[in-house]
Image (cartoon, helix red, strand yellow):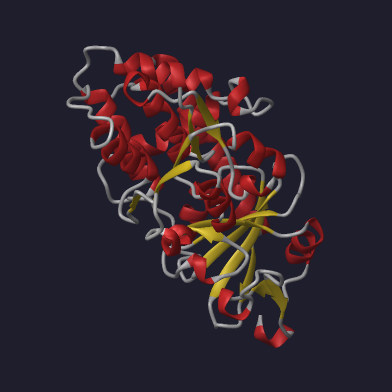
């Protein structure tokens, strides 16, 4: 009997995919569900684990080209459902079932895999609302009437997540089981349980504290393209803090923000956010035009924070992504 694996990302959109797969497990019949970050497949042990399956569905994520080819070479079917700019060059490969930059990964997986391929005919309204909330958040639809509820969904996910565990150990099981219980009710719309309201209200308070921390430490710079950006360090609440800074009266002139993630200590993980330019033009990050992430070395990250003469470099000037940030003269910053 053939074995099927589903691999998705670690953010709300990725977890949305996994929740939908659990909700319709009778239709899609996956043997295992994985939640992974980009480039996990470059680990030889992870590749060996993938080789135990006959079919692999990848959603809100994409495998590296070499991994994809190696799996195909040994007869493993790989189907991909993604929306990231970084996978656009692979969308015409055999098995790359769906690539649409106008829909989030959860929405693509639900509509193109669960409905079209698995044959779902009808879904409860809370399921449809859940998919739309994930889409609204992941695609950063700030003008949508569902925006605040979408923010709350993300707040509840991270407010209930056990960060000491992996997905396979149950890190998001509370969020998953609560969401699945909503799908089984007779409610005609999405709703919140009282404990979830408490969770997202506490998250709002934390967001305000993180916002004030960012304002107190932000470093203003100008890159080689003449774009203005802000740099700060935070352990969390990065997307919402960046959004507030970029839309504020004082810092609305900024073209983008770069946050060095300090959760668990500075490791080199960074996030870039913009409402004006394409983040993926820069070699230090990958992902979406408005929201992207990447890794510097720990040394680079500390230097980047400390010295305002360091700025991100364009991908066109750093095709192998080996430089990522570059030093400019003080007169250029």
Give me the residue at 64% from left, 62% from top.
Answer: 231
Q: Please name whichever residue, 85 or 164, is drawn nearer the observer in this view of the structure.
A: 85
Judged left or right of residue 94, residue 47 is: right
Q: Residue furthest right?
A: 299
Judged left or right of residue 66, residue 266 is: right
Judged left or right of residue 259, residue 152 is: left
* Residue 88 x %, y %: 42, 61
* Residue 199 x %, y %: 49, 24
Q: Please name whichever residue, 15 or 225, is drawn nearer the observer in this view of the structure.
A: 15
Give me the residue at 34% from left, 34% from top.
Answer: 149
The relative height of residue 74 versus residue 246 in the rendered view (above or below) is above
Give me the residue at 40% from left, 46% from top.
Answer: 138
Count the marks: how many?
0
Does residue 27 appear in the picture of this structure? Answer: yes
The relative height of residue 249 versus residue 112 in the rendered view (above or below) is below
* Residue 159 x %, y %: 54, 27
Q: Splitting the image into 4 quarters, where does residue 192 fall?
A: top left
> Where's the C terminus, which quadrant?
bottom right
Q: Splitting the image into 4 quarters, where does residue 322 fall?
A: bottom right
* Residue 100 x %, y %: 32, 54
Does residue 248 appear in the picture of this structure? Answer: no
> Where's the N terminus, which quadrant?
top left
């Amino acid at each position: 009997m053939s074995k099927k694996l589903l691999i998705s990302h670690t953010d709300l959109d990725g977890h949305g995919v996994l929740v939908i797969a659990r909700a319709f497990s009778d239709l899609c019949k996956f043997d295992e569900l994985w939640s992974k970050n980009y480039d996990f497949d470059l680990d030889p042990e992870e590749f060996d684990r993938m080789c135990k399956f006959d079919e692999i569905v990848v959603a809100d994520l994409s495998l590296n080209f070499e991994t994809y080819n190696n799996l195909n070479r040994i007869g493993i079917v790989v189907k991909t459902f993604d929306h990231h700019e970084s996978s656009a060059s692979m969308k015409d490969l055999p098995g790359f079932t769906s690539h649409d930059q106008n829909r989030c990964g959860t929405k693509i997986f639900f509509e193109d895999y669960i409905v079209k391929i698995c044959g779902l005919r009808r879904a409860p309204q809370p399921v449809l609302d859940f998919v739309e909330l994930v889409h609204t958040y992941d695609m950063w639809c700030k003008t949508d009437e569902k925006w605040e509820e979408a923010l709350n969904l993300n707040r509840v996910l991270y407010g209930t997540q056990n960060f000491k565990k992996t997905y396979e150990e149950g890190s998001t099981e509370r969020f998953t089981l609560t969401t699945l219980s909503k799908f089984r009710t007779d409610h005609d719309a999405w709703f919140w349980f009282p404990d979830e309201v408490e969770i997202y209200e506490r998250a709002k308070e934390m967001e305000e504290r993180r916002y004030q921390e960012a304002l107190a430490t932000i470093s203003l710079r100008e890159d080689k393209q003449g774009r203005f950006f802000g740099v700060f360090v935070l352990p969390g609440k990065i997307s919402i803090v960046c959004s507030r800074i970029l839309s504020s009266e004082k810092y609305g002139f900024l073209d983008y923000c770069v946050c060095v993630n300090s959760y668990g200590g500075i490791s080199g993980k960074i996030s870039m956010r913009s409402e004006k330019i394409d983040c993926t033009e820069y070699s230090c990050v990958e992902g979406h035009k408005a929201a992207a992430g990447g890794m510097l070395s720990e040394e680079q990250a500390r230097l980047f924070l400390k010295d305002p003469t360091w700025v991100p470099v364009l991908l066109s000037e750093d095709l192998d992504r080996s430089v990522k940030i570059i030093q400019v003269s003080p007169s250029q910053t």
